Amino acid sequence: MLLQKEVKRITVPLIRRMKEQGEPIAMLTAYDALMAEILDHSGIDIILVGDSGGMVMAGHENTLSVTMDEMLHYVKAVRKGVNRALLVADMPFLSYQVSVEDAVRNAGRFVQEGGAEAVKIEGGKVVLPVIEKLVDIGIPVMGHLGLTPQSIHLFGGYGVQGKEAEVAEKLKEEARLLEKAGVFSIVLEKIPALLAKEITASLTIPTIGIGAGKYCDGQVLVSHDMLGLYEKFKPKFVRRYAELGKTMLEAFINYVQDVKKRKFPDDHESY
Ligand code: KIV
């Protein structure tokens, strides 16, 4: 249990070794320094600055609107709070799809300006040249297959992917191609548990599931979802470990009432 417990810093080779040694990988998201620091103290292996930040931080309707500059702002802040976990930056929509050159420049900014140690890229065959180039120049890449939220308009929503045999075969093949292109791990989002099991068994690199069942090598959730902070939608795969939204609302209501009734501040809180 917890083979990496004594490790001062989680690295990409260590993440790969965790699969070999059967150690489950725990990953969560962060977008600011304070949350990142608390998360880093929890023993988390990977902190992802997800493009989900566009939704839970900036209030966008989906992940398509968040820009490279907004993401870089989150990555820089998170870097300040992280000393131990591996820091992965999510490449936002249009930061890697236009050209390999664009992808190198933007991934390079995450590493050079933001202090990220790896980047995450959504997609299969179409992103292989980008993955190969980034790995070639020394930037570790995490893949992302299944329900890739940057393609929701193509999917027509947030439904489970890979239920049909043809799509399942395509996902299995793309996972193998991603491994061959050099990714150090793959996020599998919202696919049937048995398909994720098959993909996981076919790869030497770890899979990290979100709504992909218990057979993946690791698990990831959006922190704001598991903390009960983001109320707009609650997929079945989210387990809530706290109800911070309710706790915060209660605290805010109590503060407002205290101010209105002149109960705050009291003499001990005054000079
Ligand atoms: O943006 C994000 O937070 C993600 C995770 C859900 C994997 O991509």
Image (spheres, rainbow, N blue to C red):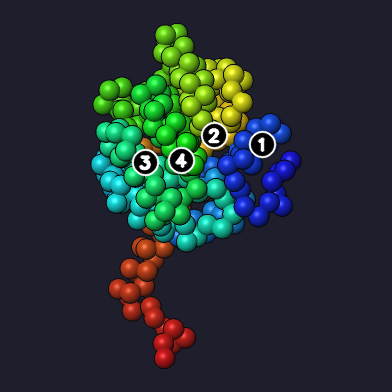
Are discs 2 and 3 less than 8 Å apart at CB? no
Q: Residue at x 47, y 86 (%)?
A: 268
- Image quadrant in which the C terminus is located: bottom left
Q: Is residue 116 visible?
A: yes
Helix, strand or loop for disc 2: loop
> What number is the disc on residue 17?
1
Label 1 to label 2: alpha-carbon separation = 10 Å
Label 2 to label 3: alpha-carbon separation = 17 Å
Are discs 3 and 4 less than 8 Å apart at CB? yes
Label 1 to label 3: alpha-carbon separation = 27 Å
First along the sequence among labels 2 and 3: 3
First along the sequence among labels 3 and 4: 3
Tag 3: residue type?
Val
Label 3 to label 4: alpha-carbon separation = 9 Å
Question: Closer to us: mark 1 or mark 3?
Answer: 3
Tag 2: residue type?
Phe
**Residue 14: image x %, image y %?**
64, 42
Are discs 4 and 2 less than 8 Å apart at CB? no
**Residue 68: image x %, image y %?**
30, 47
Provide the residue designation for mark 2: 184
Q: Residue at x 48, y 36 (%)?
A: 135
Provide the residue designation for mark 4: 137
Structural crowding at the residue carrying mark 1, measured as other residues with C-alpha within 10 Å and reported as few (<14), some (14–19) or many (≥20):
some
Provide the residue designation for mark 3: 104
Tag 1: residue type?
Arg
Q: Ligand 1: does it lie within 8 Å of the C-beta at label 4?
A: no
Question: Closer to us: mark 4 or mark 2?
Answer: 4
Q: Residue at x 30, y 51 (%)?
A: 70
Helix, strand or loop for disc 4: loop
Helix, strand or loop for disc 3: helix
